[in-house]
Image (cartoon, helix red, strand yellow):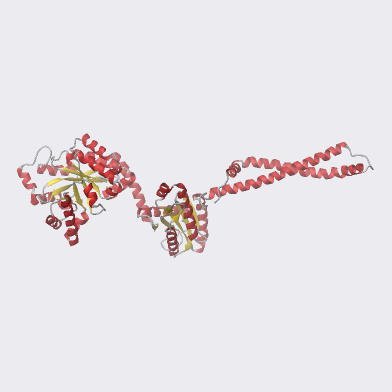
């Protein structure tokens, strides 16, 4: 679409805002035209008398005309010229105004960059298309299309390339749409397509979507740039579950449903499409409720630490606890951390949540025996904060908790996002006595070079490998290889996910470990942990005597702890 000159835009504005004034001017000009017509009539009458006298006087056969009549004739001529000129000006002004109004209409209904319909005009056009198709027993599908990682294209290549991507996207979409389809750019990198199709044949829509993905898979080339663009698509249609067109479906409803389906496609990995299903809307509403619940929970301090035992497998001795986050919401019930922690990370409140739990955990652990350690998981997002180590050390000082008793756990995925910052953070914490372990080892892509260069104090084997020890020989080989790696790097190992005696027995054959898992009891709140430690003589105010140590150490003691936990 051609860019309108600034003068035209000004005229468009005047056409919109000065209609009343234009109308009054037009009325005056019509009066002037009437005067001109009357002057012409008078000119005919006056001229028929005066002109013959003038002609006879010029040829010398008669007297000249009366002066008053001559003046009247000249006035009639002036009035005719004035009226005709004003009439032509009126015609030109009306034509210019119509042109400006048409340009204003185009601006109001189309996207100035791509020439597609815009959000405002697609609704009326699509509603009309739906009304046209329903009597013919045809349905209408609406595709909500969003480009994946478009912001990255803009940031890397500049907004001019981003505009070219949007323009080429619109051209490619237009090329594969049916003749009676509609295309709109809703804003940013979001497009909408409206496709009519035969009821009972949604495969027609699927074929169009396949063509869209096929044409978008071709890289876009520019002067000095090339961009590969993928898209996520959500689809909603007026066809219901029994294959009939739903006459109650408006374009606003379809856009809402398709937008939910598109969001679902984004969450499932992008570069794919999904048809709207009511369960998606329930899932989205549940997520919105969770986000609101998390914010309330932070203000009410509803998140609490639970503690899972960590055992020396060789002696059966309790060595410490891993802190795990738990949330029992009054409105939503008990929400597992696998659900609320990723959402808290996406909301950007994971640091606040973690700090709340750490403060409470430090106070809880101060009541334990000084030999018992506290392990805490750190979100990868927290490691993006260059001040994280300082914040953590400040918390330790504020709560008077010994740094030597704290062990933080980082996952392998952290090592690939900012290895330099992770190295600095680990070094800063270790200089103050905090231990750092590599969590979920085996599930990421950490290399031997990274393990050698980063001063980890411990490796934690992911529970997925430990669980396979009970019934899979390949699991034994994997764990044995990790044990050999740990011995070669002189790094102790913790095994997660010990759930039964068979797994425990196989682990003991492979080497020396610390371990944790449901075999030793479920994670517990501090009140239960404190009661357990009191019976063992492992609270801070007294050390275990010989009798309690004898009951606590060894495999018999650890099994006893398991029975107490259950």
Q: Position of residue 440 (x, y in %)?
A: 23, 51
Say which of 73 and 260 sits in front.
73
Drawn side of residue 491 relative to residue 210, left or right:
left
Q: Is residue 472 visible?
A: no
Q: x, y percentage for residue 367?
A: 15, 38
Residue at the limit of the structure toward the right, as seen here: 61
Of residues 401 and 384, the one nearer the viewer is 384
| Residue in view at x 16 percent, y 47 percent | 309
Decide: is 479 above or below 29.
Answer: below
**Residue farthest left in this picture:** 546
Residue 562: percent from the left, percent from the top?
13, 50
Please give left or right for residue 125 compared with residue 443 in the image: right
Residue 23 visible within the image: yes
Q: Quadrant of residue 397?
A: top left
Q: Nearer the viewer, residue 311 or 301?
A: 311
Out of 188 and 257, give the one closest to the viewer.
188
x, y percent for residue 22: 65, 41
Give the left or right position of residue 193, taking residue 66 as reference.
left
Which residue extends farthest front? Answer: 224
Q: How many marks?
A: 0
Q: Picture quarter containing residue 541?
A: top left
Q: Residue at x 87, y 43 (%)?
A: 51
């Amino acid at each position: 679409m051609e860019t309108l000159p600034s003068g035209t835009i000004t005229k468009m504005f005047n056409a919109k805002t000065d209609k009343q004034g234009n109308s009054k001017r037009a009325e005056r000009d019509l009066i002037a035209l009437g005067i001109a017509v009357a002057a012409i009539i008078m000119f005919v009458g006056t001229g028929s008398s005066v002109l013959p006298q003038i002609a006879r006087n010029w040829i010398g056969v008669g007297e000249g005309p009366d002066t008053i009549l001559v003046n009247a004739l000249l006035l009639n001529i002036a009035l005719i010229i004035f009226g005709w000129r004003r009439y032509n000006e009126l015609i030109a002004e009306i034509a210019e105004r119509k042109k400006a109004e048409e340009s204003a209409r185009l601006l109001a209904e189309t996207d100035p960059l791509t020439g597609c319909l815009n959000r405002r005009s697609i609704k009326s056009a699509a509603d009309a298309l739906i009304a046209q198709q329903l009597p013919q027993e045809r349905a209408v599908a609406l595709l909500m299309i969003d480009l994946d990682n478009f912001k990255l294209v803009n940031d890397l290549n500049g907004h001019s390339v981003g505009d070219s991507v949007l323009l080429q996207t619109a051209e490619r979409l237009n090329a594969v749409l049916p003749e009676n389809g509609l295309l709109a750019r809703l804003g940013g990198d979001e497009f909408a397509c409206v496709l009519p199709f035969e009821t009972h044949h949604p495969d027609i829509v699927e074929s169009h979507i396949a063509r869209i993905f096929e044409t978008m898979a071709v890289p876009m080339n520019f002067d000095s740039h090339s961009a590969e663009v993928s898209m996520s698509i959500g689809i909603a249609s007026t066809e219901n579950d029994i294959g009939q067109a739903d006459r109650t479906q408006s374009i606003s409803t379809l856009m809402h449903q398709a937008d939910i389906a598109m969001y679902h496609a984004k969450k499932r990995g992008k570069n794919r499409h999904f048809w709207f299903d009511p369960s998606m809307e329930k899932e989205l509403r549940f997520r919105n409720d969770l986000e609101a619940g998390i914010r309330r929970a932070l203000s009410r301090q509803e998140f609490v630490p639970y503690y899972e035992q960590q055992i020396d497998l060789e002696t059966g001795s309790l060595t410490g606890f891993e802190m795990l986050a738990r949330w029992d919401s009054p409105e939503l019930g008990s929400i597992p951390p696998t659900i609320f922690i990723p959402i808290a990370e996406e909301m950007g409140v994971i640091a606040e949540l973690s700090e709340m739990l750490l403060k409470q955990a430090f106070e809880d652990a101060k009541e334990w025996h000084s030999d018992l350690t506290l392990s805490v998981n750190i979100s990868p997002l927290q490691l993006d904060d260059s001040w994280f180590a300082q914040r953590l050390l400040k918390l330790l000082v504020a709560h008077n908790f010994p740094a030597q008793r704290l062990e933080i756990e980082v996952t392998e995925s952290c090592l690939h996002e900012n290895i330099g910052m992770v190295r600095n953070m680990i070094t800063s914490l270790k200089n103050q006595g905090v231990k750092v372990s590599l969590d979920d080892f085996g599930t990421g892509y950490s290399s031997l070079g990274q393990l050698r260069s980063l001063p980890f104090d411990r490796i934690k084997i992911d529970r997925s490998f430990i669980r396979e020890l009970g019934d899979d020989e390949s699991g034994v080989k994997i764990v044995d290889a990790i044990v050999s790696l740990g011995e070669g790097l002189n790094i102790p190992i913790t095994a997660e996910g010990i759930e039964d005696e068979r797994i425990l027995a196989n682990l003991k054959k492979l080497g020396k470990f610390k371990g944790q898992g449901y075999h030793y009891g479920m994670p517990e709140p501090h009140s239960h942990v404190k009661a357990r430690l009191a019976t063992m003589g492992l609270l801070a105010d007294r050390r275990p005597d010989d009798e309690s140590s004898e009951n606590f150490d060894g495999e018999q003691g650890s099994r006893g702890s398991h029975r107490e936990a259950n």
